Amino acid sequence: MTRDLTALADELTAMAAAEHRMAVAGAAHSEDRAEQLAWRRLTARHGDRLREIMDEVGWPTAALVGEDAARAAWLVAQHADRQLDVQRRALRLMEEAVAAGEAGARELAFLRDRTYVNEGREQVYGTQIAGVTEDGSPIPWPCAEPERVDELRAGVGIEPFDEYVARYR
């Protein structure tokens, strides 16, 4: 990896680490408006930077920037909820990368669902949770084919829906 790509890989992993720290602290769903604003500002800044990266190199694949940085780019795209242009572009570029064998279908499925939900559409794989009931049961966003969710999930390497949501309880 050239020095420029090493720096890009380091930047992407640092961006994802910063988002992870804030997410673990609960900033994205905090009742504290200052924490919510800090989360929004961070993810918007990272979304802007991801847009620039996609302009420069296309989708930052593992072959280009390494596994950790490629996963970090995907995470930044996932969190660009208020920048649908970034999510849509990342989705298109990831689709191309998956077709070329340069990115994972599992991550693409999560990004597809996240983008669809942000567009107000039904998700495909049931990866996005709208909320949690008082008893702790997760409420998924609507799925286009709920009867096929587990079959579709299996096709991209995601565990069955019931196992997935058990983690939320």
Image (cartoon, rainbow, N blue to C red):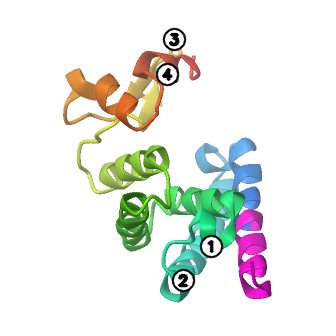
Tell me the residue that label 2 is attached to: 57
- Please, is residue 32 above or below residue 93 in the view? above
Instruction: Give the residue number, with chain letter if any, for mark 1.
Output: 64
Q: Amino acid at mark 4?
A: Val
Task: Work out how far the residue at label 2 is from the one at label 4, CA to CA, in angstroms.
Answer: 36 Å
Residue 95 point in image, percent of width and height: 36, 61
**Could you say which disc has been placed on residue 115 in the image?**
none
Amino acid at circle 1: Leu
Q: In the rendered structure, which disc, 4 or 3, sits on the residue that comes first in sequence?
A: 3
- The quadrant of the image that shows the C terminus is top right
The CA distance from mark 1 to mark 4 is 33 Å
Give the labeled residue for mark 3: 135
* Residue 93 percent across, percent down from the top left: 40, 69
Residue at screen point 58% across, 62% down: 76
| Residues tagged 2 and 3 counted as in contact (Cβ below 8 A) | no
Who is closer to the viewer here, 167 or 103? 103
Residue 127 vs 74, above or below: the answer is above
> With 58 as the anchor, is 5 left or right in this view?
right
Q: CA distance from mark 1 to mark 3?
A: 45 Å
State yes or no: discs 2 and 4 in contact (Cβ < 8 Å): no
